[in-house]
Amino acid sequence: MGTRYPLARTSRRITYKLQTHDVRKYLLTDIVQRVRRAVTRSGGELRGGVYAPPKQITRWCVNRSPHVNKKSREKFWMITHKRVIKWDADSKVDMDAPLVISRMLPASVAIRTVEDVPGLMALKDVFQTMQNMKESVSNGEETENSEK
């Protein structure tokens, strides 16, 4: 019988969420291709491809005139196009990739970065930080005592 939980992973998962209100057809597709190139160039592995959540359509209706012609209305709508890119990043991966990606986006595209650090890697980072603090404190005490 198989295990209930998958094997513990040691790499971080980074998710980029892109969205725009722009009406140009292939804007997000071009940007996703750029992001893919930047991620693979920095040493990350794309996982699961690119997910396209359903576009969000916001509609509202406004009276044309506030005093007369109450039946006459204007209808507006705004469409939000979205894409989600997920990739696994090793500790060796260049951490400037999100900065590079945010620089190559046009102003009409918003990007949000979500980082998921697995439990084992988070613990490793915590222990490493504690070890560094312990070493710096012990080194600091020795230098302070020798100066006094």
Image (cartoon, rainbow, N blue to C red):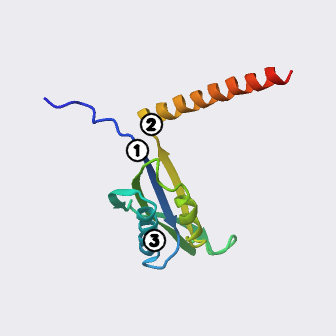
Amino acid on which disc 2 is placed: Met
Residue 137, x across and y down, in percent = 69, 25
**Of residues 107 and 41, which is closer to you in this image?**
41
Asked if residue 144 is positioned above or below residue 77 in the image, the reply reads above
Asked if residue 33 is positioned above or below residue 97 in the image, the reply reads below
Determine the secondary structure under disc 1.
loop
Give the Cα separation between the discs numbered 1 and 2. Answer: 7 Å
* Mark 3 crowdedness (10 Å alpha carbons): few <14, some 14-19, many ≥20: some
Outermost residue, front direction? Answer: 146
| 133 sits left or right of 84 in the view | right
Do callouts 3 and 1 mark residues in contact (Cβ within 8 Å)? no
Picture residue at 49% right of the left edge, 77% below the top: 23
Question: Which residue is tagged 3?
Answer: 34
* Mark 1 crowdedness (10 Å alpha carbons): few <14, some 14-19, many ≥20: some
Q: Nearer the viewer, mark 3 or mark 1?
A: 1
Screen quadrant of the N terminus: top left
Q: Which mark is residue 121?
A: 2
Do callouts 1 and 2 mark residues in contact (Cβ within 8 Å)? yes
Amino acid on which disc 3 is placed: Arg
Residue 6, x across and y down, in percent = 27, 36
Picture residue at 43% right of the left edge, 49% below the top: 90
Give the Cα separation between the discs numbered 2 and 3. Answer: 29 Å
Question: Which residue is tagged 1?
Answer: 11
Screen quadrant of the C terminus: top right
Residue 82, x across and y down, in percent = 45, 63
Residue 8, x across and y down, in percent = 33, 35
Q: Earlier in the sequence, mark 1 or mark 2?
A: 1
Picture residue at 46% right of the left edge, 61% below the top: 42
| 105 sits left or right of 142 in the view | left
Q: Earlier in the sequence, mark 3 or mark 1?
A: 1
